[in-house]
Image (spheres, rainbow, N blue to C red):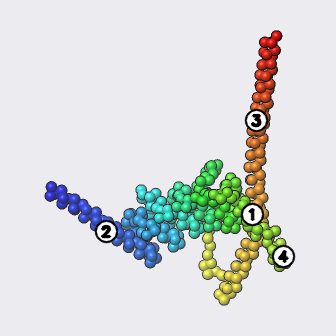
Amino acid sequence: MGNHDDDTDHIESVTCNETMKKQENTKQLFQICMEGRWKEVVEIYEKEKRAHTAKITRGGESALHLAVIDGQEEVVSELVDLIVKEESKKEALRIQNKRNNTALHFAASMGTISMVRVIADADPELVSFRNVDGETPLFLAAFHGRKEAFMILHYIFHKEPGTPVNYSNCRRNDGDTILHSTIAADNFELAFQIIHLYGDLVNWVNERGATPLHFLATKPSAFKSGSRLGRIETFIYHGIRVKQLKAETDYRPQAETRDNGKTRYPKNYQACVDFMTLMKNAASVATTKFPVATFLIGKLRKKHNKTQRRDLEAQERIASQTNLLGRDSKAQEKSTVNEIETDSSSGEG
């Protein structure tokens, strides 16, 4: 009996020591992440496999979550490479914090192409994971206007041509879809791509009964008729050419480029160059807003009219069938009445 108690105490002691050691390792890993010592984090992932699935913050984030939040693209790539080599790779990549956000949720919200691609390629099913608000990484990419990230996630999830479109990833708990969100945020270029990829969304309503067309109708500034342009603004508006939008059937983002010190202008001109770039971008936004909105309203109307046409045809068919049934019923009733009258006449005779 005494030996059994000793064994129990020994097991509890070992378990307690392991728990304390694990907590110490977790605190150490968290501290290293906070100090930005990412090379050491990679080394820990190489040596200690349990670190892959460790939640090191009060919010339930892992080291991979923190690397994504800190924008450490190379570190994220290295950590994912180490994770996929292990049998527990799905568990490590699918770690959700207290709000059920995965590392891919954060990467999609930030719109960092390399991080989105490396995580989603390692586990495409992560595209369908939902947080507490019912938002998938695909939804968050659209919600924050991250067009490149959105397109990558869509085509990773629909790799094969002819794959049925998965609409379940496009809606959150309050009923808003990715099309509602992009129009609400004036991201009309992304909304155009969404209409092409997820055409049925134009007729979807949220919990308040509003369609994307209702959202667009509340934005008078999105239309030329709803914006008051002065003479100079009107001249600029008509003088700048706007690139026609095209549906992107296969998305490959351009490689990121950096200056690398090859600029030819003096350094004291940098402020002027930055100002001109800012003005160019502002002009681009101002002049592309109206044509895109006009095109969107046309697309939305076409989709809406097509649906109404189908509904009207269905109603006509039902009405026609109802009329036929009504006529047959009346004819049958008339025949029955005639037979009764005939029988009555015969009886009287």
Q: Earlier in the sequence, mark 3 or mark 4?
A: 4
C-alpha span from label 4 to label 1 = 26 Å
Name the foreground residue: 210 vs 81: 210
Residue placed under numbered mark 4 in the picture: 235
Label 3 packing within 10 angstroms: few (<14), some (14-19), many (20+): few
Return the residue at label 3.
322
Q: Locate residue 206, reporting x and y percent.
A: 64, 57
Q: Are marks 2 and 1 in contact (CB under 8 Å)?
A: no
Would residue 255 be visible to someone looking at this image?
yes
**Image point 57% across, 65% down: which residue?**
108
Disc with the residue nearer the chain's start (3 vs 1): 1
User: What amino acid type is highlighted by mark number 2?
Assistant: Met
User: Badge 1: few (under 14), some or many (20 or more) residues near its Cα, within 10 Å?
Assistant: few
Query: Disc 2 versus disc 4: distance between alpha carbons?
Result: 71 Å
Task: Report the residue marked by disc 2.
Answer: 20
- Mark 3 → mark 1, Cα distance in angstroms: 38 Å
Query: Mark 2 or mark 1, which has the lower sequence index?
Result: 2
- Residue 208 picture location, percent across and down: 65, 59
> The residue under label 4 is which amino acid type?
Phe
Which of disc 2 and disc 3 is earlier in sequence?
Answer: 2
Q: Distance of mark 3 from mark 2, alpha carbons?
A: 76 Å
Numbered badge on residue 208: none
